[in-house]
Image (cartoon, rainbow, N blue to C red):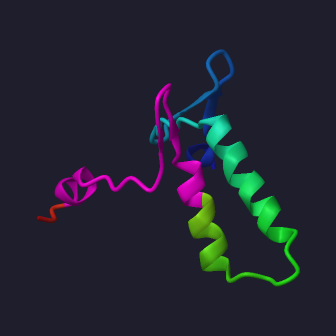
Amino acid sequence: MESDRVAVDSSNLTVAGTAFADYEIDHYKQLYREYVRYLISQSQVRVPVWLEEGLAQIVMDIELLDTALIYGKIDSRKGIMAGGG
């Protein structure tokens, strides 16, 4: 059973022998998302899950600049990268 073991390097918190994925978490965006979900949960009528998550994703993706607030931006590069036209 020696092949089932995974070596963990505690000095840099990576796992040896596994595929490495670099995840970046924006804590402010997560806070915005959870705040929207909290506000929606306070309503008398339960909204559909797809609407709740859609609104949370839109608010989570807000870009706040000094002179503008950008929300609902469509990234057209995603379709090109995936092979779309």
On the image, the x and y values in percent for residue 54 come to 56, 68
Q: Please identify the residue farthest to the top as the structure is shown.
A: 11
What residue is shown at x 63% (from left), y 50% (from top)?
A: 1
Tell me if residue 72 comes above or below residue 67 in the rendering: below
Along the line of sight, which residue is nearer the eye, 78 or 39? Answer: 39
What residue is shown at x 39% (from left), y 52% (from top)?
A: 73
Q: Is residue 74 magenta?
A: yes
Along the line of sight, which residue is nearer the eye, 34 or 43? Answer: 43
Give the image quarter of residue 46: bottom right
Side (left or right) of 66 relative to 75: right
Side (left or right) of 47 relative to 50: right
What residue is shown at x 52% (from left), y 48% (from top)?
A: 61
On the image, the x and y values in percent for residue 69 come to 50, 40
Q: How many marks?
A: 0
Side (left or right) of 84 relative to 76: left
On the image, the x and y values in percent for residue 42 come to 88, 69
Q: Please identify the residue farthest to the front as the structure is shown.
A: 67
Quadrant (top left/top right/bottom left/bottom right) for the C terminus: bottom left
Give the image quarter of residue 43: bottom right
Tell me if residue 72 comes above or below residue 30 in the rendering: below
On the image, the x and y values in percent for residue 72 come to 44, 56
Along the line of sight, which residue is nearer the eye, 50 or 44? Answer: 44
Q: Is residue 65 magenta?
A: yes
For the magenta stretch, what is the residue range? 57-82
